[in-house]
Protein backbone atom coordinates (compact mmCIF):
# COMPACT_ATOMS: atom_id res chain seq x y z
CA UNK A 1 0.00 0.00 0.00
CA UNK A 2 1.17 3.52 -0.76
CA UNK A 3 1.92 5.72 2.24
CA UNK A 4 0.21 8.73 0.63
CA UNK A 5 -2.62 8.45 -1.89
CA UNK A 6 -4.04 11.49 -3.65
CA UNK A 7 -7.19 10.83 -5.62
CA UNK A 8 -8.89 13.29 -7.99
CA UNK A 9 -7.55 16.24 -5.97
CA UNK A 10 -9.00 19.57 -7.11
CA UNK A 11 -8.53 23.02 -5.63
CA UNK A 12 -10.46 26.07 -6.79
CA UNK A 13 -10.34 29.67 -5.60
CA UNK A 14 -12.97 32.33 -6.05
CA UNK A 15 -11.53 35.33 -7.84
CA UNK A 16 -13.10 38.49 -9.20
CA UNK A 17 -15.05 37.48 -12.26
CA UNK A 18 -15.14 33.75 -11.65
CA UNK A 19 -13.18 30.75 -10.41
CA UNK A 20 -9.48 29.97 -10.65
CA UNK A 21 -8.52 26.30 -10.73
CA UNK A 22 -5.14 25.77 -9.08
CA UNK A 23 -5.10 21.95 -9.09
CA UNK A 24 -7.07 19.95 -11.66
CA UNK A 25 -8.24 16.53 -10.45
CA UNK A 26 -4.79 14.99 -10.01
CA UNK A 27 -3.87 11.50 -8.81
CA UNK A 28 -0.57 10.70 -7.08
CA UNK A 29 0.84 7.87 -4.98
CA UNK A 30 3.87 8.23 -2.70
CA UNK A 31 5.39 4.97 -1.56
CA UNK A 32 7.45 3.90 1.44
CA UNK A 33 10.99 5.26 1.11
CA UNK A 34 10.10 7.58 -1.80
CA UNK A 35 11.83 10.91 -2.24
CA UNK A 36 8.98 12.25 -4.34
CA UNK A 37 9.45 15.66 -5.93
CA UNK A 38 6.72 17.83 -7.41
CA UNK A 39 8.34 20.14 -9.93
CA UNK A 40 7.04 22.75 -12.32
CA UNK A 41 7.07 26.47 -13.15
CA UNK A 42 5.70 29.14 -10.84
CA UNK A 43 1.92 29.02 -10.56
CA UNK A 44 1.59 25.41 -11.76
CA UNK A 45 -0.13 24.20 -8.56
CA UNK A 46 2.72 22.32 -6.90
CA UNK A 47 2.72 24.28 -3.61
CA UNK A 48 -1.09 24.23 -3.46
CA UNK A 49 -0.93 20.44 -3.80
CA UNK A 50 1.58 20.21 -0.96
CA UNK A 51 -0.51 22.49 1.24
CA UNK A 52 -3.55 20.28 0.64
CA UNK A 53 -1.51 17.24 1.67
CA UNK A 54 -0.40 19.12 4.79
CA UNK A 55 -3.92 20.22 5.67
CA UNK A 56 -3.10 23.90 5.25
CA UNK A 57 -5.57 24.10 2.35
CA UNK A 58 -8.94 22.37 2.07
CA UNK A 59 -9.45 20.61 -1.28
CA UNK A 60 -12.51 21.58 -3.31
CA UNK A 61 -12.95 17.88 -4.09
CA UNK A 62 -11.00 14.65 -4.04
CA UNK A 63 -9.42 12.57 -1.29
CA UNK A 64 -6.08 12.36 0.54
CA UNK A 65 -5.21 9.15 2.38
CA UNK A 66 -2.31 8.40 4.73
CA UNK A 67 -1.70 4.65 5.09
CA UNK A 68 -5.25 4.06 3.88
CA UNK A 69 -6.80 6.54 6.36
CA UNK A 70 -8.79 9.40 4.84
CA UNK A 71 -7.26 12.63 6.19
CA UNK A 72 -8.89 15.03 3.72
CA UNK A 73 -10.74 16.92 6.44
CA UNK A 74 -8.41 16.15 9.37
CA UNK A 75 -6.49 19.12 10.90
CA UNK A 76 -2.80 19.54 10.18
CA UNK A 77 -1.71 18.74 13.74
CA UNK A 78 -3.36 15.32 13.53
CA UNK A 79 -1.86 14.21 10.21
CA UNK A 80 1.52 13.05 11.55
CA UNK A 81 3.56 15.23 9.20
CA UNK A 82 6.60 17.47 9.56
CA UNK A 83 6.96 20.38 7.16
CA UNK A 84 9.97 22.48 6.18
CA UNK A 85 9.32 25.77 4.41
CA UNK A 86 11.34 28.11 2.20
CA UNK A 87 11.78 30.46 5.15
CA UNK A 88 14.08 28.99 7.81
CA UNK A 89 12.03 30.70 10.55
CA UNK A 90 14.12 29.89 13.63
CA UNK A 91 13.17 31.73 16.81
CA UNK A 92 15.98 34.30 17.28
CA UNK A 93 15.60 34.48 21.08
CA UNK A 94 16.04 30.71 21.47
CA UNK A 95 19.24 28.71 21.27
CA UNK A 96 19.55 26.15 18.49
CA UNK A 97 18.90 23.43 21.08
CA UNK A 98 15.67 25.13 22.12
CA UNK A 99 14.63 25.68 18.51
CA UNK A 100 15.18 22.04 17.56
CA UNK A 101 13.34 20.58 20.54
CA UNK A 102 10.45 23.03 20.50
CA UNK A 103 8.03 20.57 18.77
CA UNK A 104 8.77 18.07 21.56
CA UNK A 105 8.10 20.71 24.20
CA UNK A 106 4.68 21.26 22.67
CA UNK A 107 4.05 17.53 23.17
CA UNK A 108 5.00 17.93 26.85
CA UNK A 109 7.97 15.57 26.61
CA UNK A 110 10.18 15.82 29.67
CA UNK A 111 13.43 17.78 29.42
CA UNK A 112 15.79 14.80 29.69
CA UNK A 113 14.11 13.06 26.76
CA UNK A 114 14.02 16.28 24.75
CA UNK A 115 17.74 16.79 25.27
CA UNK A 116 18.50 13.20 24.28
CA UNK A 117 16.50 13.49 21.06
CA UNK A 118 18.06 16.87 20.28
CA UNK A 119 21.56 15.46 20.62
CA UNK A 120 20.60 12.56 18.34
CA UNK A 121 19.24 14.67 15.48
CA UNK A 122 22.04 17.23 15.85
CA UNK A 123 24.48 14.41 15.14
CA UNK A 124 22.47 13.40 12.08
CA UNK A 125 22.69 16.90 10.57
CA UNK A 126 26.23 17.40 11.91
CA UNK A 127 25.71 20.45 14.15
CA UNK A 128 26.21 19.11 17.73
CA UNK A 129 28.73 21.86 18.48
CA UNK A 130 26.17 24.58 17.62
CA UNK A 131 23.38 23.62 20.01
CA UNK A 132 24.08 26.38 22.54
CA UNK A 133 24.47 29.13 19.97
CA UNK A 134 21.72 31.47 18.75
CA UNK A 135 20.49 31.65 15.13
CA UNK A 136 22.13 35.06 14.63
CA UNK A 137 25.53 33.48 15.28
CA UNK A 138 25.15 30.88 12.53
CA UNK A 139 25.75 30.92 8.79
CA UNK A 140 22.90 30.34 6.36
CA UNK A 141 23.85 26.70 5.87
CA UNK A 142 24.07 26.09 9.61
CA UNK A 143 20.63 27.65 10.16
CA UNK A 144 19.24 25.45 7.38
CA UNK A 145 20.65 22.37 9.10
CA UNK A 146 19.09 23.47 12.37
CA UNK A 147 15.71 23.88 10.66
CA UNK A 148 16.14 20.43 9.14
CA UNK A 149 16.92 18.98 12.57
CA UNK A 150 13.74 20.57 13.97
CA UNK A 151 11.81 18.83 11.17
CA UNK A 152 13.48 15.45 11.74
CA UNK A 153 12.93 15.43 15.51
CA UNK A 154 9.18 15.20 15.02
CA UNK A 155 9.57 11.63 13.65
CA UNK A 156 6.52 11.95 11.36
CA UNK A 157 4.87 9.56 8.93
CA UNK A 158 5.99 11.79 6.06
CA UNK A 159 8.25 14.80 5.55
CA UNK A 160 6.94 17.71 3.44
CA UNK A 161 9.40 20.28 2.06
CA UNK A 162 8.35 23.43 0.21
CA UNK A 163 11.29 24.88 -1.76
CA UNK A 164 13.60 24.78 1.30
CA UNK A 165 16.75 25.62 -0.70
CA UNK A 166 15.48 28.44 -2.91
CA UNK A 167 17.00 31.23 -0.78
CA UNK A 168 20.48 29.68 -0.65
CA UNK A 169 23.40 30.49 -2.93
CA UNK A 170 24.45 27.96 -5.56
CA UNK A 171 27.29 26.36 -3.57
CA UNK A 172 25.20 26.04 -0.43
CA UNK A 173 22.34 24.51 -2.40
CA UNK A 174 24.62 21.71 -3.58
CA UNK A 175 25.82 21.11 -0.01
CA UNK A 176 22.31 21.02 1.42
CA UNK A 177 21.08 18.72 -1.35
CA UNK A 178 23.67 16.19 -0.23
CA UNK A 179 22.69 16.63 3.42
CA UNK A 180 18.99 16.08 2.70
CA UNK A 181 19.68 13.03 0.51
CA UNK A 182 21.94 11.48 3.14
CA UNK A 183 19.35 12.01 5.86
CA UNK A 184 16.56 10.62 3.70
CA UNK A 185 18.54 7.45 3.05
CA UNK A 186 19.30 7.10 6.76
CA UNK A 187 15.73 7.64 7.98
CA UNK A 188 13.88 5.95 5.12
CA UNK A 189 10.79 8.11 5.61
CA UNK A 190 8.79 9.15 2.53
CA UNK A 191 9.46 12.75 1.58
CA UNK A 192 7.40 15.03 -0.67
CA UNK A 193 9.57 17.85 -1.95
CA UNK A 194 8.36 20.85 -3.96
CA UNK A 195 10.67 22.88 -6.18
CA UNK A 196 10.70 24.85 -9.44
CA UNK A 197 14.33 23.77 -9.98
CA UNK A 198 14.47 20.74 -12.28
CA UNK A 199 18.14 20.20 -11.37
CA UNK A 200 17.17 19.67 -7.72
CA UNK A 201 14.43 17.30 -8.83
CA UNK A 202 16.69 15.22 -11.07
CA UNK A 203 19.55 14.93 -8.57
CA UNK A 204 17.56 14.22 -5.39
CA UNK A 205 14.46 12.24 -6.31
CA UNK A 206 13.47 8.62 -6.60
CA UNK A 207 10.36 9.75 -8.50
CA UNK A 208 9.14 13.07 -9.89
CA UNK A 209 5.75 14.53 -10.80
CA UNK A 210 5.96 17.30 -13.41
CA UNK A 211 3.10 19.79 -13.06
CA UNK A 212 1.85 22.43 -15.48
CA UNK A 213 -1.23 24.64 -15.14
CA UNK A 214 -2.68 22.52 -12.34
CA UNK A 215 -2.20 19.22 -14.18
CA UNK A 216 0.27 16.40 -13.65
CA UNK A 217 1.96 15.99 -17.03
CA UNK A 218 4.02 12.93 -16.12
CA UNK A 219 5.21 10.89 -13.12
CA UNK A 220 8.38 8.83 -13.31
CA UNK A 221 11.95 8.32 -12.22
CA UNK A 222 14.49 10.97 -13.22
CA UNK A 223 15.77 8.67 -15.98
CA UNK A 224 12.24 8.01 -17.28
CA UNK A 225 11.41 11.71 -17.48
CA UNK A 226 14.70 12.55 -19.15
CA UNK A 227 14.80 9.63 -21.58
CA UNK A 228 11.08 9.24 -22.33
CA UNK A 229 9.25 12.55 -21.75
CA UNK A 230 5.51 12.14 -22.27
CA UNK A 231 5.10 15.39 -24.19
CA UNK A 232 6.72 18.59 -25.37
CA UNK A 233 6.24 20.34 -22.02
CA UNK A 234 8.13 17.67 -20.08
CA UNK A 235 10.80 17.41 -22.77
CA UNK A 236 11.32 21.18 -22.63
CA UNK A 237 11.17 21.50 -18.84
CA UNK A 238 13.39 18.54 -17.89
CA UNK A 239 17.02 18.94 -18.86
CA UNK A 240 19.41 21.88 -18.82
CA UNK A 241 19.94 23.10 -21.45
CA UNK A 242 16.50 22.10 -22.70
CA UNK A 243 15.71 20.01 -25.76
CA UNK A 244 15.84 21.42 -29.27
CA UNK A 245 12.56 21.39 -31.20
CA UNK A 246 12.15 21.61 -34.97
CA UNK A 247 8.56 21.89 -36.29
CA UNK A 248 7.81 19.98 -39.45
CA UNK A 249 5.44 17.59 -41.15
CA UNK A 250 5.43 13.99 -42.31
CA UNK A 251 6.13 14.38 -46.03
CA UNK A 252 5.73 10.71 -46.88
CA UNK A 253 5.35 7.23 -45.42
CA UNK A 254 6.32 4.26 -47.56
CA UNK A 255 7.10 0.68 -46.55
CA UNK A 256 7.34 1.69 -42.91
CA UNK A 257 9.83 4.51 -43.56
CA UNK A 258 8.76 8.11 -43.11
CA UNK A 259 10.39 11.34 -44.19
CA UNK A 260 9.97 14.21 -41.76
CA UNK A 261 10.56 17.59 -43.39
CA UNK A 262 11.45 20.71 -41.46
CA UNK A 263 9.12 23.67 -41.84
CA UNK A 264 11.39 25.43 -44.30
CA UNK A 265 12.73 22.30 -45.99
CA UNK A 266 16.30 22.77 -44.77
CA UNK A 267 16.35 19.70 -42.51
CA UNK A 268 14.79 16.30 -43.12
CA UNK A 269 14.72 13.17 -40.98
CA UNK A 270 13.93 9.60 -41.99
CA UNK A 271 12.32 7.34 -39.37
CA UNK A 272 11.21 3.73 -39.45
CA UNK A 273 7.92 2.13 -38.42
CA UNK A 274 5.77 5.25 -38.44
CA UNK A 275 2.13 4.35 -39.24
CA UNK A 276 0.94 5.51 -42.64
CA UNK A 277 -1.85 7.43 -40.90
CA UNK A 278 0.71 10.09 -39.93
CA UNK A 279 1.40 11.06 -43.55
CA UNK A 280 0.71 14.79 -43.99
CA UNK A 281 0.49 15.37 -40.24
CA UNK A 282 2.31 18.16 -38.41
CA UNK A 283 4.96 16.87 -36.02
CA UNK A 284 7.88 18.18 -33.96
CA UNK A 285 11.33 16.61 -34.01
CA UNK A 286 13.33 16.96 -30.79
CA UNK A 287 16.89 16.21 -29.71
CA UNK A 288 18.94 17.19 -26.69
CA UNK A 289 21.89 19.61 -27.02
CA UNK A 290 24.36 17.01 -25.77
CA UNK A 291 23.29 14.76 -28.64
CA UNK A 292 23.90 17.36 -31.35
CA UNK A 293 27.37 17.38 -32.89
CA UNK A 294 28.94 20.50 -34.36
CA UNK A 295 31.72 20.29 -36.93
CA UNK A 296 33.65 22.72 -39.08
CA UNK A 297 33.51 20.06 -41.81
CA UNK A 298 30.25 21.15 -43.42
CA UNK A 299 29.98 17.96 -45.46
CA UNK A 300 29.38 15.84 -42.34
CA UNK A 301 26.02 17.13 -41.12
CA UNK A 302 22.35 17.45 -41.96
CA UNK A 303 22.21 21.22 -41.52
CA UNK A 304 24.59 24.13 -42.09
CA UNK A 305 24.64 27.48 -40.30
CA UNK A 306 26.90 29.98 -38.59
CA UNK A 307 27.67 30.01 -34.88
CA UNK A 308 25.69 32.78 -33.18
CA UNK A 309 26.98 32.45 -29.62
CA UNK A 310 29.28 30.36 -27.44
CA UNK A 311 28.61 29.97 -23.70
CA UNK A 312 31.09 28.29 -21.35
CA UNK A 313 29.46 25.69 -19.02
CA UNK A 314 32.04 23.98 -16.80
CA UNK A 315 34.13 21.79 -19.11
CA UNK A 316 31.76 22.27 -22.04
CA UNK A 317 30.64 25.07 -24.27
CA UNK A 318 27.05 25.57 -25.40
CA UNK A 319 26.96 26.44 -29.09
CA UNK A 320 24.03 28.37 -30.55
CA UNK A 321 23.46 28.18 -34.29
CA UNK A 322 20.62 29.76 -36.22
CA UNK A 323 17.94 27.15 -36.87
CA UNK A 324 15.11 27.18 -39.40
CA UNK A 325 12.60 28.29 -36.74
CA UNK A 326 14.60 29.02 -33.57
CA UNK A 327 18.17 28.78 -32.35
CA UNK A 328 19.58 25.24 -32.18
CA UNK A 329 21.84 24.40 -29.24
CA UNK A 330 24.58 21.80 -28.99
CA UNK A 331 27.28 21.15 -26.41
CA UNK A 332 30.94 20.67 -27.28
CA UNK A 333 34.16 20.29 -25.27
CA UNK A 334 35.27 23.75 -24.18
CA UNK A 335 38.66 23.32 -25.86
CA UNK A 336 37.07 22.75 -29.30
CA UNK A 337 38.41 25.31 -31.77
CA UNK A 338 35.13 26.81 -32.92
CA UNK A 339 34.48 30.54 -32.87
CA UNK A 340 31.45 32.78 -33.15
CA UNK A 341 30.36 33.57 -36.75
CA UNK A 342 32.15 30.45 -37.99
CA UNK A 343 30.27 28.27 -40.55
CA UNK A 344 29.55 24.81 -39.08
CA UNK A 345 27.43 21.73 -39.70
CA UNK A 346 25.08 19.93 -37.32
CA UNK A 347 24.59 16.18 -37.10
CA UNK A 348 22.52 14.02 -34.73
CA UNK A 349 22.57 10.28 -34.14
CA UNK A 350 19.23 8.79 -35.12
CA UNK A 351 18.80 6.97 -31.80
CA UNK A 352 18.71 10.35 -30.03
CA UNK A 353 15.77 11.78 -32.01
CA UNK A 354 12.33 12.27 -30.44
CA UNK A 355 9.11 12.69 -32.42
CA UNK A 356 6.02 14.48 -31.08
CA UNK A 357 2.59 14.67 -32.71
CA UNK A 358 0.56 17.80 -33.44
CA UNK A 359 -0.91 17.85 -29.92
CA UNK A 360 2.56 17.71 -28.37
CA UNK A 361 2.45 14.09 -27.17
CA UNK A 362 5.46 11.83 -27.67
CA UNK A 363 4.90 9.53 -30.64
CA UNK A 364 8.12 7.68 -30.11
CA UNK A 365 11.79 7.90 -29.46
CA UNK A 366 13.08 6.24 -32.59
CA UNK A 367 15.81 3.69 -31.90
CA UNK A 368 17.73 3.80 -35.15
CA UNK A 369 16.37 6.42 -37.52
CA UNK A 370 18.45 7.58 -40.45
CA UNK A 371 19.05 11.29 -40.74
CA UNK A 372 19.33 12.63 -44.26
CA UNK A 373 20.27 15.97 -45.73
CA UNK A 374 17.44 18.21 -46.89
CA UNK A 375 17.06 18.79 -50.60
Image (cartoon, helix red, strand yellow):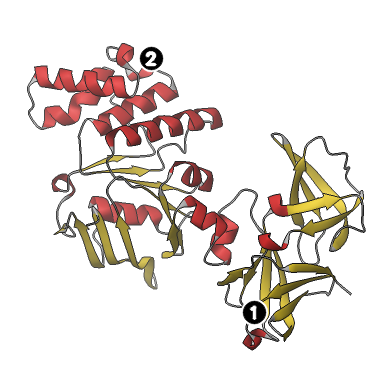
Packing grade of label 1 (10 A; few <14, some 14-19, many >=20) is many
- Image vertical order of residue 153 relative to residue 311, above or below: above
Mark closest to the chain's N terminus, 1 or 2 = 2
Q: Where is residue 351 in the image (x, y as percent from the top left)?
A: 67, 61
- Image vertical order of residue 293 relative to residue 128, above or below: below
Residue hosting label 2: 137
- Identify the residue at horizontal 23%, vertical 21% (top origin): 120
In front: 259, or 319?
A: 259
In front: 68, or 139?
A: 68
Q: Position of residue 151 (x, y in %)?
A: 27, 33
Quadrant (top left/top right/bottom left/bottom right) for the N terminus: bottom left
Q: Where is residue 298 in the image (x, y as percent from the top left)?
A: 92, 56
- Identify the residue at horizontal 63%, vertical 88% (top origin): 277
- Image vertical order of residue 53 relative to residue 151, above or below: below
Marking on residue 305: none
- Image vertical order of residue 316 relative to residue 23, above or below: above
Quadrant (top left/top right/bottom left/bottom right) for the C terminus: bottom right
Q: Is residue 342 left or right of residue 237?
A: right
* SS at badge 2: helix
Residue hosting label 1: 274
Q: In this view, does 133 lie to the left or right of 313?
A: left
Look at the numbered discs 1 and 2 and tell me whether their residues touch, using CB distance below 8 Å. Answer: no
Amino acid sequence: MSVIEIESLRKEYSVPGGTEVAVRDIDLEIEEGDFFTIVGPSGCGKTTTLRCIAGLETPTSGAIRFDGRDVTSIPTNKRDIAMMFQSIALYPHMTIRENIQYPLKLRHMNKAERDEETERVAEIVQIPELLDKYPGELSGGQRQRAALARTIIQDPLVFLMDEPLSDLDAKLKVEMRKVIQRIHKRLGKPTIYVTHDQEEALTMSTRIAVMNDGNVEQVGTPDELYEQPANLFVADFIGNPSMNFIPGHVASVSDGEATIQGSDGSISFSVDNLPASYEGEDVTVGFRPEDGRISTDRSQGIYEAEVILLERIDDRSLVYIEGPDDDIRATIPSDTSITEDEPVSLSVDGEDVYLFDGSGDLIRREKEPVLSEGA
